[in-house]
């Protein structure tokens, strides 16, 4: 007779573990797909897709949420196979920051001369993935992400005219 109560307890434990694993599983949500424009006004067909992976929904992120923000860059056909540099600018609290090669964010003064790529010498394929953030946002607010890239032999940048927005609450 003791088999049944033990089986019930074990089944209940398995159910709780299963609930916990599915309740806290990270999900990936596409937050923006943005067509590029260029610094010189010429046509472009490149697109930038930004996605958030977290245990919370992308529209319910908090300062305690673990967040992974990724960029999927789909360059126009003429840029595939070329070497590129990739840039990210974030606006947070009314201030501008740029993503650096070591994965940290540094203040940006808003000039092209001060804009430095976080990824260089990248051979572009039909889709290219880059990590923009892996961690927590330390302050609540609205974070605006702009991305851009430039290829060898061209002086123009292809960029997002509108930002991807990540709202974060306490």
Image (cartoon, rainbow, N blue to C red):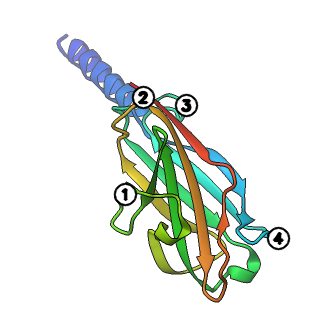
Front position among marks 4 and 1: 1
Labels 3 and 1: the sequence-earlier one = 3
What secondary structure is found at the residue carrying circle 2? Answer: helix
What residue did someone put label 1 on?
A: 106
Classify the position of the N terminus by image quarter: top left
Labels 4 and 3: the sequence-earlier one = 4
Is 22 left, or right, of 163 in this rendering?
Answer: left
Residue 69 vertical position relative to residue 159 in the rendered view, above or below: above
Q: CA distance from mark 3 to mark 1?
A: 26 Å
Labels 2 and 4: the sequence-earlier one = 2
**Mark on residue 43?**
4
Front position among marks 2 and 3: 3
Front position among marks 3 and 1: 1
What secondary structure is found at the residue carrying circle 1? Answer: strand
Task: Name the one closer to the observer, 70 or 108.
Answer: 108
Front position among marks 2 and 4: 4
Task: Name the one closer to the observer, 109 or 72.
Answer: 109
Q: CA distance from mark 2 to mark 4?
A: 45 Å
Could you classify mark 4 by the number of other residues whose Cα lies within 10 Å: few (under 14), some (14-19), or many (20 or more)? Answer: few
What residue did someone put label 3 on?
A: 59
| Residue 160 drawn at (x, y percent) | 66, 57
Front position among marks 1 and 2: 1
| Residue 92 drawn at (x, y percent) | 46, 42
Labels 2 and 3: the sequence-earlier one = 2
Q: CA distance from mark 4 to mark 3?
A: 33 Å
**Mark on residue 82?**
none
């Amino acid at each position: 007779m003791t088999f049944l109560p033990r089986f019930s307890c074990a089944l209940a434990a398995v159910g709780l573990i299963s609930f916990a694993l599915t309740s806290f599983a990270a999900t990936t949500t596409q937050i923006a797909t943005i067509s590029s424009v260029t610094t010189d006004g010429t046509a472009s067909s490149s697109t930038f897709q930004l996605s958030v992976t977290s245990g919370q929904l992308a529209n319910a992120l908090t300062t305690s949420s673990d967040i992974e923000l990724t960029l999927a860059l789909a360059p126009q056909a003429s840029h595939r196979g070329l070497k590129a540099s990739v840039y990210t600018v974030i606006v947070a609290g009314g201030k501008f920051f740029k993503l650096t090669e070591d994965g940290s964010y540094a203040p940006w003064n808003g000039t092209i001369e001060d804009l430095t790529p976080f990824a260089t010498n990248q051979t572009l394929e039909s889709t290219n993935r880059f990590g923009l953030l892996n961690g927590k946002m330390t302050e609540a607010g609205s974070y605006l992400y702009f991305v851009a890239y430039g290829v060898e032999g061209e002086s123009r940048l292809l960029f997002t005219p509108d930002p991807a927005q990540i709202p974060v609450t306490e």
